């Protein structure tokens, strides 16, 4: 996977080409504003993988914090269930 850098101005002119480069070739496109990275355009499948990895990392961190605190998964479930029922 290649990374390509384009300016906002170039991105406006060549939007269709840039989208094609990203989706068909699998490249990440870094869009710069005044020479500084502003956003990244990436293939949707890459985004989904990145999102899943991020959520998994958050869950693993939560698991670690819960194990240190001594709170069980069942206690978390029971309390969240109780809280949801109170809202109804």
Image (spheres, helix red, strand yellow):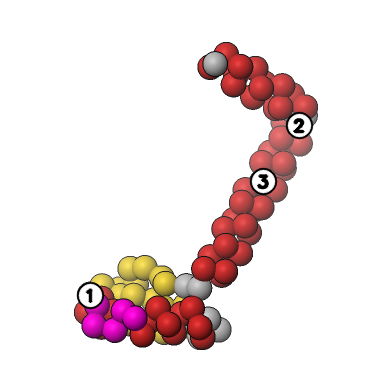
- For marks 2 and 1, give the CA distance: 48 Å
Q: Position of residue 38 (x, y in %)?
A: 33, 68
For residue 82, above or below residue 51: above
* Residue 5 seen in render: no
Q: Position of residue 77 (x, y in %)?
A: 71, 27
- Report the side of 55 relative to 11 (left or right): right
Query: Which residue occupies 34% across, 81% down?
Result: 16
Q: Image check: 50 left or right of 81?
A: left
Q: Position of residue 41 (x, y in %)?
A: 42, 72
- Residue that numbered label 1 is attached to: 34
In the rendered structure, the answer to whether residue 53 lies left or right of residue 21 reads right
Q: Is residue 85 above or below residue 37?
A: above
* Residue 9 in view in this figure: yes
User: How far apart are the two marked residues, 3 and 2, measured between alpha carbons?
Assistant: 12 Å
Q: Nearer the viewer, residue 73 or 27?
A: 27
Q: Is residue 17 above or below residue 30?
A: below
State which mark lies toward you, 2 or 1.
2
Please give the range of residues in magenta: 12-16
- Indicate whether 5 appears above or below 83: below
The residue under the point 72% across, 21% down is 78
**Would residue 52 be found to the left or right of residue 75 on screen?**
left
Of the residues under marks 3 and 2, which one precedes in the sequence? 3
Q: Earlier in the sequence, mark 2 or mark 1?
A: 1
Pointer 3 residue = 59
Element assignment for label 1: loop
Q: Which mark is residue 73?
A: 2
């Amino acid at each position: 996977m290649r990374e390509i850098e384009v300016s906002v101005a170039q991105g406006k002119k060549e939007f269709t080409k840039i989208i094609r480069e990203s989706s068909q070739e699998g490249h990440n496109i870094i869009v710069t504003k005044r020479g500084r990275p502003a956003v990244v355009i990436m293939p949707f499948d890459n985004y989904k993988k990145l999102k899943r990895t991020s959520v998994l990392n958050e869950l693993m961190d939560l698991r670690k914090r819960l194990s240190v605190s001594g709170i069980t998964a069942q206690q978390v479930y029971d309390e969240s269930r109780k809280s949801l029922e109170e809202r109804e």
